[in-house]
Protein backbone atom coordinates (compact mmCIF):
# COMPACT_ATOMS: atom_id res chain seq x y z
CA UNK A 1 0.00 0.00 0.00
CA UNK A 2 2.84 2.39 0.78
CA UNK A 3 4.27 1.97 -2.69
CA UNK A 4 0.82 2.45 -4.27
CA UNK A 5 0.20 5.61 -2.23
CA UNK A 6 3.57 7.01 -3.30
CA UNK A 7 2.76 6.18 -6.90
CA UNK A 8 -0.59 7.91 -6.62
CA UNK A 9 0.98 11.01 -5.04
CA UNK A 10 3.61 11.13 -7.77
CA UNK A 11 0.94 10.81 -10.44
CA UNK A 12 -1.17 13.61 -8.93
CA UNK A 13 1.91 15.87 -8.69
CA UNK A 14 2.83 15.16 -12.29
CA UNK A 15 -0.70 15.95 -13.46
CA UNK A 16 -0.70 19.18 -11.43
CA UNK A 17 2.60 20.29 -12.94
CA UNK A 18 1.39 19.43 -16.43
CA UNK A 19 -1.87 21.35 -15.95
CA UNK A 20 0.05 24.34 -14.64
CA UNK A 21 2.36 24.26 -17.63
CA UNK A 22 -0.57 23.99 -20.04
CA UNK A 23 -2.28 26.94 -18.37
CA UNK A 24 0.93 28.95 -18.55
CA UNK A 25 1.45 28.14 -22.22
CA UNK A 26 -2.17 29.02 -23.00
CA UNK A 27 -1.79 32.37 -21.25
CA UNK A 28 1.44 33.03 -23.15
CA UNK A 29 -0.20 32.24 -26.48
CA UNK A 30 -3.09 34.59 -25.74
CA UNK A 31 -0.67 37.36 -24.79
CA UNK A 32 1.23 37.01 -28.07
CA UNK A 33 -1.70 36.64 -30.46
CA UNK A 34 -4.82 38.57 -31.44
CA UNK A 35 -7.40 36.61 -33.43
CA UNK A 36 -4.78 33.88 -33.94
CA UNK A 37 -2.40 36.36 -35.60
CA UNK A 38 1.05 36.60 -33.99
CA UNK A 39 1.87 39.98 -32.50
CA UNK A 40 4.93 42.08 -33.30
CA UNK A 41 6.08 39.91 -36.23
CA UNK A 42 6.71 41.93 -39.36
CA UNK A 43 5.66 40.83 -42.84
CA UNK A 44 5.59 42.59 -46.20
CA UNK A 45 2.42 44.51 -47.02
CA UNK A 46 3.87 46.07 -50.17
CA UNK A 47 6.99 44.43 -51.58
CA UNK A 48 10.31 45.93 -52.71
CA UNK A 49 10.44 48.63 -55.38
CA UNK A 50 6.74 49.47 -55.61
CA UNK A 51 7.52 52.81 -54.00
CA UNK A 52 10.82 54.66 -54.42
CA UNK A 53 13.55 54.59 -51.80
CA UNK A 54 12.03 57.83 -50.53
CA UNK A 55 8.84 56.11 -49.36
CA UNK A 56 7.47 57.95 -46.33
CA UNK A 57 4.42 59.43 -44.68
CA UNK A 58 2.09 56.46 -44.16
CA UNK A 59 -1.38 57.50 -43.04
CA UNK A 60 -4.70 55.66 -42.98
CA UNK A 61 -8.00 57.32 -43.91
CA UNK A 62 -11.25 56.62 -42.09
CA UNK A 63 -12.26 54.10 -44.78
CA UNK A 64 -9.12 52.07 -44.08
CA UNK A 65 -7.16 53.08 -47.19
CA UNK A 66 -3.43 53.51 -46.62
CA UNK A 67 -1.53 56.33 -48.33
CA UNK A 68 2.22 56.93 -48.63
CA UNK A 69 4.41 59.28 -50.65
CA UNK A 70 6.64 58.56 -53.65
CA UNK A 71 4.79 55.78 -55.43
CA UNK A 72 7.01 54.62 -58.33
CA UNK A 73 8.53 58.09 -58.66
CA UNK A 74 9.35 61.06 -56.43
CA UNK A 75 6.67 63.71 -56.00
CA UNK A 76 3.69 61.36 -56.02
CA UNK A 77 1.25 59.93 -53.48
CA UNK A 78 0.34 56.26 -53.63
CA UNK A 79 -2.94 54.67 -52.56
CA UNK A 80 -2.81 51.20 -50.96
CA UNK A 81 -6.20 49.49 -50.77
CA UNK A 82 -4.93 46.09 -49.63
CA UNK A 83 -1.91 43.83 -49.36
CA UNK A 84 0.11 43.94 -52.61
CA UNK A 85 -2.45 46.36 -54.05
CA UNK A 86 -1.09 49.87 -54.69
CA UNK A 87 -1.84 52.52 -57.28
CA UNK A 88 -1.17 56.18 -58.02
CA UNK A 89 -3.36 58.74 -56.27
CA UNK A 90 -1.81 61.93 -57.63
CA UNK A 91 1.41 63.54 -58.85
CA UNK A 92 1.94 66.67 -56.76
CA UNK A 93 2.14 70.00 -58.65
CA UNK A 94 4.98 72.54 -58.88
CA UNK A 95 7.78 70.09 -58.16
CA UNK A 96 6.51 69.40 -54.65
CA UNK A 97 7.74 66.26 -52.89
CA UNK A 98 5.77 64.98 -49.95
CA UNK A 99 6.96 63.51 -46.67
CA UNK A 100 4.62 63.14 -43.69
CA UNK A 101 0.86 62.71 -44.23
CA UNK A 102 -2.00 63.15 -41.74
CA UNK A 103 -5.80 63.19 -41.83
CA UNK A 104 -8.11 65.39 -39.80
CA UNK A 105 -11.42 64.20 -38.32
CA UNK A 106 -13.32 65.33 -41.43
CA UNK A 107 -11.09 63.31 -43.74
CA UNK A 108 -8.96 66.07 -45.28
CA UNK A 109 -5.41 64.99 -46.10
CA UNK A 110 -2.39 67.12 -45.18
CA UNK A 111 1.06 66.57 -46.71
CA UNK A 112 4.40 68.04 -45.64
CA UNK A 113 6.07 69.37 -48.81
CA UNK A 114 9.76 69.71 -48.00
CA UNK A 115 10.76 71.15 -51.39
CA UNK A 116 8.49 74.20 -51.45
CA UNK A 117 8.22 74.85 -47.67
CA UNK A 118 4.53 74.00 -47.66
CA UNK A 119 1.90 71.95 -45.93
CA UNK A 120 -0.44 70.83 -48.71
CA UNK A 121 -4.08 69.83 -48.45
CA UNK A 122 -6.36 67.48 -50.40
CA UNK A 123 -10.05 67.86 -49.60
CA UNK A 124 -11.95 64.94 -48.12
CA UNK A 125 -14.65 65.24 -50.76
CA UNK A 126 -12.14 64.83 -53.60
CA UNK A 127 -10.69 61.75 -51.93
CA UNK A 128 -14.14 60.27 -51.39
CA UNK A 129 -15.15 60.92 -55.01
CA UNK A 130 -11.87 59.59 -56.44
CA UNK A 131 -11.49 62.95 -58.17
CA UNK A 132 -8.04 63.96 -56.93
CA UNK A 133 -5.87 65.79 -59.46
CA UNK A 134 -2.83 68.06 -59.27
CA UNK A 135 -5.09 71.09 -59.73
CA UNK A 136 -7.03 70.17 -56.58
CA UNK A 137 -3.95 70.00 -54.34
CA UNK A 138 -4.02 73.19 -52.27
CA UNK A 139 -1.28 75.01 -50.38
CA UNK A 140 -2.67 75.00 -46.84
CA UNK A 141 0.30 76.65 -45.13
CA UNK A 142 3.60 78.15 -46.29
CA UNK A 143 6.58 79.87 -44.71
CA UNK A 144 9.83 80.91 -46.36
CA UNK A 145 11.42 80.53 -42.91
CA UNK A 146 10.89 76.77 -42.98
CA UNK A 147 13.93 74.60 -43.74
CA UNK A 148 11.99 71.64 -45.11
CA UNK A 149 8.81 70.54 -43.33
CA UNK A 150 9.35 66.88 -42.68
CA UNK A 151 6.73 65.18 -40.53
CA UNK A 152 3.39 66.42 -39.20
CA UNK A 153 1.11 65.61 -36.29
CA UNK A 154 -2.46 66.66 -35.62
CA UNK A 155 -4.61 67.32 -32.56
CA UNK A 156 -8.22 66.19 -32.41
CA UNK A 157 -9.30 69.81 -33.05
CA UNK A 158 -7.30 69.98 -36.29
CA UNK A 159 -4.27 71.96 -35.12
CA UNK A 160 -1.16 70.70 -36.92
CA UNK A 161 2.48 70.54 -35.87
CA UNK A 162 5.41 70.23 -38.26
CA UNK A 163 8.99 69.18 -37.63
CA UNK A 164 11.50 71.14 -39.69
CA UNK A 165 15.07 69.80 -39.80
CA UNK A 166 18.17 71.35 -41.31
CA UNK A 167 20.24 68.28 -42.10
CA UNK A 168 23.25 70.30 -43.26
CA UNK A 169 23.98 71.78 -39.84
CA UNK A 170 22.20 69.27 -37.61
CA UNK A 171 19.60 71.72 -36.32
CA UNK A 172 15.84 72.00 -36.53
CA UNK A 173 12.66 73.86 -35.75
CA UNK A 174 9.13 73.10 -34.59
CA UNK A 175 6.04 74.76 -36.12
CA UNK A 176 2.35 74.94 -35.35
CA UNK A 177 -0.15 75.31 -38.19
CA UNK A 178 -3.22 77.14 -36.90
CA UNK A 179 -6.76 76.29 -37.88
CA UNK A 180 -9.99 78.25 -37.52
CA UNK A 181 -12.16 75.36 -38.68
CA UNK A 182 -15.10 75.55 -36.28
CA UNK A 183 -16.41 72.22 -37.52
CA UNK A 184 -13.50 70.60 -35.72
CA UNK A 185 -14.10 72.52 -32.51
CA UNK A 186 -10.86 74.51 -32.65
CA UNK A 187 -10.49 76.98 -29.80
CA UNK A 188 -8.00 79.23 -31.59
CA UNK A 189 -10.57 81.97 -32.19
CA UNK A 190 -9.77 84.30 -35.07
CA UNK A 191 -6.30 82.96 -35.86
CA UNK A 192 -5.95 82.52 -39.64
CA UNK A 193 -6.39 78.99 -40.94
CA UNK A 194 -3.10 77.71 -42.28
CA UNK A 195 -0.97 80.30 -40.46
CA UNK A 196 2.48 78.86 -39.63
CA UNK A 197 3.73 79.80 -36.15
CA UNK A 198 7.30 79.03 -35.08
CA UNK A 199 7.14 77.36 -31.66
CA UNK A 200 10.82 76.57 -31.11
CA UNK A 201 14.07 77.17 -33.00
CA UNK A 202 17.66 76.02 -32.41
CA UNK A 203 16.68 72.43 -31.74
CA UNK A 204 18.45 69.30 -32.96
CA UNK A 205 17.41 67.67 -36.25
CA UNK A 206 13.68 67.57 -35.57
CA UNK A 207 11.96 64.67 -37.29
CA UNK A 208 9.20 62.51 -35.80
CA UNK A 209 6.33 64.39 -34.15
CA UNK A 210 3.19 63.06 -32.48
CA UNK A 211 0.36 63.93 -30.07
CA UNK A 212 -0.77 61.82 -27.10
CA UNK A 213 -4.27 60.22 -27.10
CA UNK A 214 -5.59 62.82 -24.63
CA UNK A 215 -4.13 65.71 -26.68
CA UNK A 216 -2.24 66.94 -23.61
CA UNK A 217 1.29 66.00 -24.70
CA UNK A 218 3.35 66.69 -27.80
CA UNK A 219 6.34 64.47 -28.65
CA UNK A 220 9.19 65.56 -30.93
CA UNK A 221 12.35 63.62 -31.69
CA UNK A 222 15.77 64.72 -32.94
CA UNK A 223 17.26 62.20 -35.36
CA UNK A 224 20.97 62.90 -35.10
CA UNK A 225 20.92 63.66 -31.37
CA UNK A 226 18.75 60.54 -30.74
CA UNK A 227 16.51 62.30 -28.21
CA UNK A 228 12.73 62.30 -27.78
CA UNK A 229 11.28 65.39 -26.09
CA UNK A 230 7.84 65.86 -24.60
CA UNK A 231 5.89 69.08 -24.00
CA UNK A 232 2.69 69.87 -22.16
CA UNK A 233 0.10 70.87 -24.74
CA UNK A 234 -2.82 73.29 -24.33
CA UNK A 235 -6.09 73.11 -26.31
CA UNK A 236 -4.84 76.10 -28.31
CA UNK A 237 -1.68 74.23 -29.34
CA UNK A 238 0.71 76.12 -27.10
CA UNK A 239 3.63 74.14 -25.64
CA UNK A 240 5.37 74.36 -22.27
CA UNK A 241 7.27 72.31 -19.68
CA UNK A 242 9.68 70.67 -22.12
CA UNK A 243 11.49 67.62 -20.78
CA UNK A 244 13.38 64.62 -22.10
CA UNK A 245 11.31 61.45 -22.48
CA UNK A 246 14.04 59.05 -23.64
CA UNK A 247 17.38 59.07 -25.45
CA UNK A 248 19.19 56.35 -27.40
CA UNK A 249 22.88 55.51 -27.73
CA UNK A 250 22.95 54.54 -31.39
CA UNK A 251 21.17 54.73 -34.75
CA UNK A 252 18.71 57.39 -35.86
CA UNK A 253 15.13 58.30 -35.04
CA UNK A 254 12.39 58.92 -37.60
CA UNK A 255 8.57 58.97 -37.64
CA UNK A 256 6.41 58.26 -34.57
CA UNK A 257 2.83 57.33 -33.63
CA UNK A 258 1.00 56.67 -30.36
CA UNK A 259 -1.46 53.91 -29.57
CA UNK A 260 -4.58 54.30 -27.42
CA UNK A 261 -2.56 53.42 -24.30
CA UNK A 262 -0.24 56.35 -24.96
CA UNK A 263 2.72 54.19 -25.95
CA UNK A 264 5.00 55.75 -28.57
CA UNK A 265 6.07 53.74 -31.64
CA UNK A 266 9.38 55.12 -32.96
CA UNK A 267 11.03 54.20 -36.27
CA UNK A 268 14.71 53.47 -35.49
CA UNK A 269 16.43 54.32 -38.76
CA UNK A 270 19.46 52.10 -39.43
CA UNK A 271 18.62 49.65 -36.67
CA UNK A 272 15.66 48.08 -38.45
CA UNK A 273 13.28 48.12 -35.51
CA UNK A 274 10.24 49.95 -34.18
CA UNK A 275 10.90 50.93 -30.57
CA UNK A 276 7.79 50.97 -28.37
CA UNK A 277 8.17 53.38 -25.46
CA UNK A 278 5.74 53.94 -22.59
CA UNK A 279 4.46 57.43 -21.65
CA UNK A 280 6.90 57.26 -18.73
CA UNK A 281 9.87 56.81 -21.09
CA UNK A 282 10.42 53.08 -20.56
CA UNK A 283 11.51 51.04 -23.59
CA UNK A 284 8.86 48.29 -23.62
CA UNK A 285 10.00 46.32 -26.67
CA UNK A 286 11.62 46.51 -30.09
CA UNK A 287 9.84 45.05 -33.12
CA UNK A 288 12.33 43.55 -35.58
CA UNK A 289 11.74 44.46 -39.23
CA UNK A 290 13.00 42.90 -42.46
CA UNK A 291 14.64 46.11 -43.69
CA UNK A 292 17.07 48.28 -41.78
CA UNK A 293 15.73 51.74 -42.61
CA UNK A 294 12.18 52.37 -41.35
CA UNK A 295 11.06 55.96 -41.97
CA UNK A 296 7.60 56.18 -40.45
CA UNK A 297 4.66 54.27 -38.99
CA UNK A 298 0.85 54.38 -39.10
CA UNK A 299 -1.97 52.38 -37.50
CA UNK A 300 -4.77 50.86 -39.56
CA UNK A 301 -6.67 47.65 -40.25
CA UNK A 302 -10.26 46.86 -39.29
CA UNK A 303 -9.50 47.13 -35.58
CA UNK A 304 -6.76 49.77 -35.77
CA UNK A 305 -4.14 47.30 -34.49
CA UNK A 306 -2.17 46.80 -37.72
CA UNK A 307 0.98 48.92 -37.83
CA UNK A 308 2.29 49.89 -41.27
CA UNK A 309 5.97 50.81 -41.63
CA UNK A 310 7.48 52.55 -44.66
CA UNK A 311 10.93 51.19 -45.51
CA UNK A 312 13.55 53.35 -47.20
CA UNK A 313 16.09 51.54 -49.41
CA UNK A 314 13.56 48.73 -49.98
CA UNK A 315 10.83 51.01 -51.34
CA UNK A 316 8.42 48.75 -49.47
CA UNK A 317 5.86 48.79 -46.67
CA UNK A 318 6.02 46.25 -43.87
CA UNK A 319 3.30 45.58 -41.31
CA UNK A 320 2.85 43.94 -37.93
CA UNK A 321 0.07 43.47 -35.40
CA UNK A 322 -0.03 45.28 -32.07
CA UNK A 323 -2.00 44.59 -28.89
CA UNK A 324 -3.45 48.10 -29.03
CA UNK A 325 -5.14 50.28 -31.63
CA UNK A 326 -3.68 53.59 -32.76
CA UNK A 327 -4.87 56.70 -30.96
CA UNK A 328 -6.84 58.00 -33.97
CA UNK A 329 -8.72 54.75 -34.57
CA UNK A 330 -12.48 55.15 -34.18
CA UNK A 331 -13.92 52.06 -32.54
CA UNK A 332 -13.65 49.90 -29.45
Image: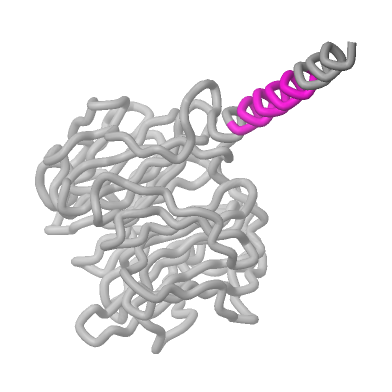
Residue 103 position in % (x across, y down): 44, 46
Residue 233 position in % (x across, y down): 63, 69
Q: Residue at x 52, y 67 (%)?
A: 219
Residue situated in front as seen by the camera: 191 or 6: 6
Residue 15, relative to residue 54: is it above or below? above
**Residue ranking furthest to the front:** 2
Residue 71, relative to residue 202: is it above or below? above
Quadrant holding the C terminus: top right
Q: Quadrant of residue 40?
A: top left
Residue situated in front as seen by the camera: 295 or 165: 295
Is 132 positioned to the left or the right of 185 in the image?
Answer: left
Is residue 248 one of those drawn in magenta? no
Q: Is residue 189 something one can see in this rendering? A: no
Residue 270 position in % (x across, y down): 26, 62
Q: Residue at x 83, y 15 (%)?
A: 3
Residue 140 position in % (x across, y down): 36, 59
Q: Residue at x 42, y 45 (%)?
A: 298
Colour style of the rendered protein structure:
one colour
Q: What segment carries the magenta color? A: 12-28
Q: Quadrant of residue 278?
A: bottom right
Q: Residue at x 87, y 15 (%)?
A: 5
Is residue 21 one of those drawn in magenta? yes
Q: Is residue 181 something one can see in this rendering? A: yes
Q: Please, what is the dominant secondary structure of the magenta stretch?
A: helix
Is 275 positioned to the left or the right of 7 in the image?
Answer: left
Quadrant holding the N terminus: top right
Is 90 positioned to the left or the right of 33 in the image?
Answer: left
Amino acid sequence: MKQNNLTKVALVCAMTILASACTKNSTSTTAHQVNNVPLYQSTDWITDGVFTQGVEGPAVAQNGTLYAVNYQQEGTIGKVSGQSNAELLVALPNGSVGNGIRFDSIGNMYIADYVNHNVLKIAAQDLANNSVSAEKVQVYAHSAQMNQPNDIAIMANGILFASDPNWANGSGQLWRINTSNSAQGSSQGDKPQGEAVLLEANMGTTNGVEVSPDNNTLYVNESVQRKVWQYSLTPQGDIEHKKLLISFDDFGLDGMRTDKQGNLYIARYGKGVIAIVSPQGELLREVQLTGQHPTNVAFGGKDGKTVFVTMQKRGAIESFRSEFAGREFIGN
